[in-house]
Image (spheres, rainbow, N blue to C red):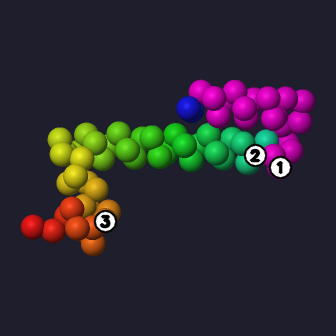
Amino acid sequence: MIEKKVEEAMEVCEGKPEAGVCRVAWDEVEELGKAMANLRWKVGQSKDPLEWFCVENPESEECHD
């Protein structure tokens, strides 16, 4: 998915790298990269995905003993 967004950003920015839509396209790539890194970190911190789910969603019924 990141590769697709990079390709899209390159197409949008071709010939007009200072355009606002170009900046937005690269911002999307950056945000997606951050989200992927965050997910990898969370999964790496715990073998149980439910554990990190409950950290972010403590009110969920799956997280109550």
* Amino acid carrying mark 2 in the image: Arg
Q: Position of residue 56 (x, y in %)?
A: 32, 63
Residue at left offset 64%, top offset 45%: 28
- The residue pinned by badge 2 equals 23
Q: Position of residue 9 (x, y in %)?
A: 73, 34
* Amino acid carrying mark 1 in the image: Gly
Q: Residue furthest front?
A: 61
Q: Residues within 10 Å of mark 2 (few under 14, many from 20)?
A: some
- The residue pinned by badge 1 equals 20
Q: Residues within 10 Å of mark 3 (few under 14, many from 20)?
A: few
The magenta span reads 3-21
Q: Are marks 3 and 1 in contact (CB under 8 Å)?
A: no
How far is the residue under mark 3 from the one under mark 1? 36 Å
Residue 5 highlighted magenta (yes or no): yes
Main secondary structure along the magenta-highlighted residues: helix
Residue 24 highlighted magenta (yes or no): no
Note whether 4 is above or below 45 in the view shown. above
Give the numbered dot on residue 33: none
| Image quadrant in which the N terminus is located | top right
- Describe residue 11's horizontal placement relative to residue 63 as left or right: right
Q: Are marks 2 and 3 in contact (CB under 8 Å)?
A: no
- The residue pinned by badge 3 equals 57
- Describe residue 61's horizontal placement relative to residue 22 as left or right: left
